[in-house]
Image (cartoon, rainbow, N blue to C red):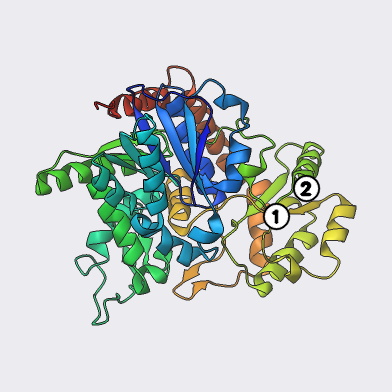
């Protein structure tokens, strides 16, 4: 159930812009949308962030919130959401029923003289927020924490995954997977397996996100224009086309990234996840500081990915045999490591195995490898999932990345992108201007 009165400042009765911010309840998603909310609060927007009760005590202590109108509505995670990803996803889509206590809390605050939200900003997985926005009569803005490549794919989903695209629709409502080339305007060429099997067998949530995107007043994306020009341009073109077809106002597109600035969330367990303790993070950073520049492989597939034991073993054996320094973030499969592996690599000073942290996706792989040319694909996708990557293939990739001219060229291109990102978020940079435009677009309370 929601708790009340959790606010840094009491601004009751003031007429101002007020964003109700609804994250998808996983650490990375909450962290991304929090950063967006912070930047809007710094521009004078009142924020009410919906989070788990145990997160309120952590976030509310952040010094950067001092002096900002930053508020919380909290709930008991055990009574609202499942910890299984797809159950969590389905729960997030049915927000009207699940968030009924939050409606009641907003009504209590309104009666106490506190201003109601003038817009809703919601994570892409919380598309039920569109219905909430309609119910209370305010605009909604969908937020993509993952960048424009995935946003563009999901925008296309209602057409592509309902029999109007390249995939034949079967009698049971699923699609026949297509193994060959798939072309989507604004995206690099892909193959069917790049889209993952459940895109075809369980397409409902991707379709719902694409539909919500078309119904939202704005599309907020954690990227910057120089990084994903083709995707942003195509998203804008499609938004205009959809609006013209439906007779509604065109959804504005706001590239507000990168929101993840290295220094902003140093030593905050709320952001970095519950699985990696502060002592482990400190130890891993200390170990990194002891290594030569450009000498460490960072390996991470994210907290939701479940490695097969055979794949964990192949990578571990190849790392140990290569003598390569590495930091491997492995969240759920450490029991599959070869016996004594962690002790041996720690004693040699060559390796560190941690838990928690971030992820990538097959769609992003195509863009990183084929367009930006700052990465190498390891192995290949099949409709049954990623094929087993053998140790010889891993060792070939290690050499390419850290010893060959090709790897040096990739690092150079990545460094150029880093500089462009820094320019985007600098004072007066394009990201700051886009954030100003977003804050300006949020309505002021009129009642």
**SS for tag 2?**
helix
Which residue matches tag 2? 280
Name of the residue lying farthest toward the bottom:
171
User: Which residue is depicted at the point 66% across and 38% down?
Assistant: 268
Task: Give 20 or 381, whichever is nearer the viewer.
Answer: 20
Mark 1 or 2, nearer chain start: 2
Q: Nearer the viewer, residue 384 or 306?
A: 306
SS class of the residue under badge 1?
Answer: loop
**C-beta proximity under 8 Å, tags 1 and 2:** yes
| Whole-number angstrom distance, CA of label 1 to CA of label 2 | 8 Å
Query: Which of 332/185 is in front?
Result: 332
- Front residue of 171/38: it is 38
| Count of numbered badges drawn on the protein | 2
Q: Residue 235 lies in what quarter of the image?
A: top left
Q: Residue 359: give x, y in percent of width and height.
A: 55, 53
Residue 257 visible here: no
Q: Which corner quadrant of the image does residue 329 belong to?
A: bottom right
Is 397 placed above or below 406 here? below
Q: Position of residue 294 (x, y in %)?
A: 70, 39
Residue at (46%, 39%) from the top-left corner? Answer: 49
Q: Is residue 309 left or right of residue 140?
A: right
Report if residue 31 is visible in the image: yes
Q: Which residue is mark 1?
A: 355
- Name the residue rendered at 18%, 41% in the picture: 240
Q: Position of residue 64 (x, y in %)?
A: 58, 25
* Residue at point 16%, 38% (across, down): 249
| Residue with the most extreme front position | 111
Q: Quadrant of the C terminus?
A: top left
């Amino acid at each position: 159930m929601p708790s009340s009165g959790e606010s840094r400042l009491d601004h009751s009765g003031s007429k101002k812009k007020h964003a109700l911010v609804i994250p998808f309840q996983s650490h990375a998603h909450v962290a991304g949308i929090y950063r967006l909310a912070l930047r809007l609060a710094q521009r004078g927007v009142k924020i009410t962030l919906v989070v788990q009760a145990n997160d309120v005590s952590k976030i509310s202590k952040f010094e950067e919130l001092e002096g900002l109108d930053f508020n919380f509505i909290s709930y008991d995670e055990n009574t609202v959401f499942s910890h299984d990803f797809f159950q969590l996803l389905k729960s997030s889509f049915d927000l009207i029923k699940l968030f009924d206590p939050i409606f009641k809390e907003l009504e209590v605050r309104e009666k106490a003289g506190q201003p109601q939200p003038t817009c809703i900003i919601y994570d892409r997985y919380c598309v039920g927020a569109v219905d909430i926005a309609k119910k209370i009569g305010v605009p909604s803005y969908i937020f993509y924490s993952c960048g424009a490549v995935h946003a563009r794919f999901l925008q296309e989903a209602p057409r592509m995954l309902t029999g109007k695209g390249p995939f034949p629709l079967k009698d049971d409502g699923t699609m026949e997977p297509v193994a060959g080339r798939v072309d989507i305007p604004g995206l690099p060429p892909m193959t069917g397996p790049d889209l993952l099997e459940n895109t075809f067998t369980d397409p409902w949530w991707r379709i719902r996100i694409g539909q919500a995107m078309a119904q939202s007043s704005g599309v907020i994306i954690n990227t910057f224009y120089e990084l994903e020009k083709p995707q942003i341009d195509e998203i804008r073109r499609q938004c205009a086309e959809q609006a013209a077809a439906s007779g509604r106002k065109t959804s504005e597109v706001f590239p507000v990234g990168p929101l993840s600035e290295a220094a902003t969330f140093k030593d905050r367990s709320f952001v970095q996840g519950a699985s990696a303790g502060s002592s482990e993070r400190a130890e891993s950073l200390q170990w990194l500081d002891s290594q030569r520049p450009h000498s460490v492989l960072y390996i991470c597939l994210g907290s939701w990915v479940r490695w097969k034991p055979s794949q964990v073993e192949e990578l571990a054996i190849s790392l140990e045999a290569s003598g390569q320094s590495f930091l491997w973030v492995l969240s759920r499969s450490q029991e599959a490591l070869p016996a004594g592996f962690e002790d041996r690599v720690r004693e040699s000073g060559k390796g560190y195995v941690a838990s928690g942290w971030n992820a990538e996706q097959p769609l992003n792989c195509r863009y990183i490898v084929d367009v930006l040319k700052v990465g190498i694909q390891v192995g290949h996708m099949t409709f049954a999932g990623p094929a087993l990557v053998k140790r010889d293939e891993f060792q070939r990739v290690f050499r390419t990345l850290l010893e060959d001219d090709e790897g040096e060229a990739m690092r150079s291109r990545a460094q150029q992108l880093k500089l462009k990102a820094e320019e985007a978020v600098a004072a007066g940079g394009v990201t700051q201007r886009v954030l100003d435009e977003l804050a300006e677009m949020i309505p002021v309370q009129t009642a």
